[in-house]
Amino acid sequence: MTIPSLNYLFRASAATFKRFPLGIIAAILCSFFACRLVHLNHDGSGQKYVESYYTRILMTCYLGMLLFIALPLLVERLKWSLKQNVLLQAVCLGLLLTYFLSLPVQLHTIVCTRFVLYALGLLFFVAFAPFMKRGEMNGFWQYNRIAFLRIFMAGLYSGVLYIGIAVGLLAIDKLFNANLDGKIYIDFWIIIVGVFAPWFFMAGLPERWEELDSLQMYPKGLKIFTQYILLTLVAIYGIILYSYGFKIVVTSHWPVGWVAYLVIGFSVVGMLSILLIWPIQNDTDNKWIKTFIRFFYIGLFPLILLLSLAIYKRIAQYGVTEDRYFVVLTAIWLAFIAFYFLIVKEKNIKLIPISLCLILFASSFGPWGTFDVSKRSQLRHLEGIFNRYALLDESKHYVSGKIIKWQDESELSSVVQYLVEVHGANVMQPYLRQSLDSLFKKNSFKYSRESAEKVLKLMGLSYVSSWDKGNELSLHVACNSVVHVADYDDYIPNAFYFYSYQDRLEKDSLFLKSGYKLSQDSMTVSFRQGKAIDIVFQKGERLSFDLLPIINSLVKFKSIISDDTLPAEKMAFIISGRKADVKMQFRDMVIRREKDEDHIQRFSIDMLVRWKK
């Protein structure tokens, strides 16, 4: 084995650049602007605009890199003339420029999600771009095998190269006191991943397309990996999912939403396994492969039904969101692919990347796309809550002042937060008489939780934070909070601790009573029926500390902040008696909500006692 000379590496790199000039230029621009973002000072509105500008260029160049990897491969296979090639690339440059100019300064959820859809769609386009014509199944498979192997090698080489450079930089920094900026490590990582890795990947893509279809190479290690690792995972996932399905049938319980992701994972691993062993299914020693493929796709249908039931329940309750839209789309696609591979005799594995590419692009725009469908669904869901309480007048404007149940107020907060964060505050304008422009500055960010809170406040509603949706609020005193004890005679740290094993306080609990000997008396502290703390002094006085006002006060305060850490004074309460004042300093508290009622599930307190003269 000979080590390639520098001259050979230079010539190979130059040949790759000549073959993919715009793809490599786009990769270099990606790395350049990524480095600029790293070194940008993230302070001030002007810097935010520059950050957005660089990010938009980065997004456009990344899509351009993927596009200009696929296009030269397509042109080579179609044997287009230089004039046709230049025209095609000019049109694509125009599309990229249009995309860049269409990007808003505020890169909200829809913009970022659409970028991800385009990027994934272009990745699948790279997978089939050289094989747009019919046939050449083996050539298509061999091309993707080479591409995937090249991706793996690019990742491996990039990792080793970066570790070597990072250790070298660290040695220079320590041995020569160079005081290198820590960002230089990030710069090298960006350059290696953003320039070296794509260049290396492009250099390994095949050029002799006619020879690929007759190539009979199949790595033995690939079969071992697929047969003994991937198929084992498929079997394990299948057993788990079918066992869960059997449990649902026996118990008549609706499937949980999380099972949808497990079904999708099972399907992806199974289909990847099938694709990896596709070329050898007709070999004499591998007749089991066709049987496995058939049974896999037959077995997929009950799991698709399981997935559909799980996501149907979520959509019926809360409407469509982008995530649920893609779960439904995945279920439809899986059913289509399963039918295709079971019914069609001449199976075309190109259908998998082609269909995924088309679905990703088609779902990114239009009234059928994920954003419009989700928006319409959530607006219907919102109006359903409004109509439940007759909150809309004849002109469809919101009428405030009516009492709403906590569950519906929580749901209303969730829907408004989603609509504002994803689609912008202006989506709520039709329901409000007051112009929303008066709530926000001209260049303010209207796609945020804070904006949702402003809209809800304008509607006369309180924002129900995420803890409410989980029915549990956890609060604790800030670590740097100081408890002042100068005005008190006795201080009892960790005076009382309560924890309920059950969801309700009346059930099993620990440490319901504690006794302490103080400077002027002794006292016993007990927790009564989950509603009050009783303090009994040995000399006869009894104090009762009602917890319900405390719970209401803390819940109300938490509804206007986003942090779970509170200052000590917000969690301190005083009760006065004839002989003493007792201060309860709560250290932490967990409040659980059930059926519009709040209950303390856990708390710990310090106690301070001041004796009256």
Image (spheres, helix red, strand yellow):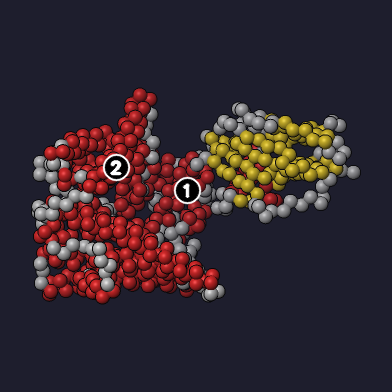
Residue 519 place in picture, x, y as percent: 86, 40
Query: Which residue occupies 53% across, 72% down?
Result: 175
Relative depth, front residue between 433 and 218: 218
Mark 1: secondary structure: helix
Relative depth, front residue between 379 and 168: 168
- The residue where tag 2 is placed is 230
Residue type (three-letter) at the residue carrying disc 1: Ser
Q: Is residue 133 visible?
A: yes
**Could you tell which of marks 2 and 1 lies nearer the N-terminus?**
2
Residue 5 place in picture, x, y as percent: 27, 72
- The residue where tag 1 is placed is 413
Pointer 2 and pointer 1: residues touching (CB < 8 Å)? no
Query: Which residue occupies 26% across, 33% down?
Result: 302
Mark 1 surroundings: few (<14), some (14-19) or many (≥20) residues within 10 A:
many
Looking at the image, residue 439 sits to the left or right of residue 326; the answer is right
Q: Is residue 428 visible?
A: no
In which quadrant of the rendered view does residue 493 lie?
Answer: top right
Relative depth, front residue between 291 and 582: 291
Residue lying farthest to the top in this orientation: 250
Mark 2 surroundings: few (<14), some (14-19) or many (≥20) residues within 10 A:
some
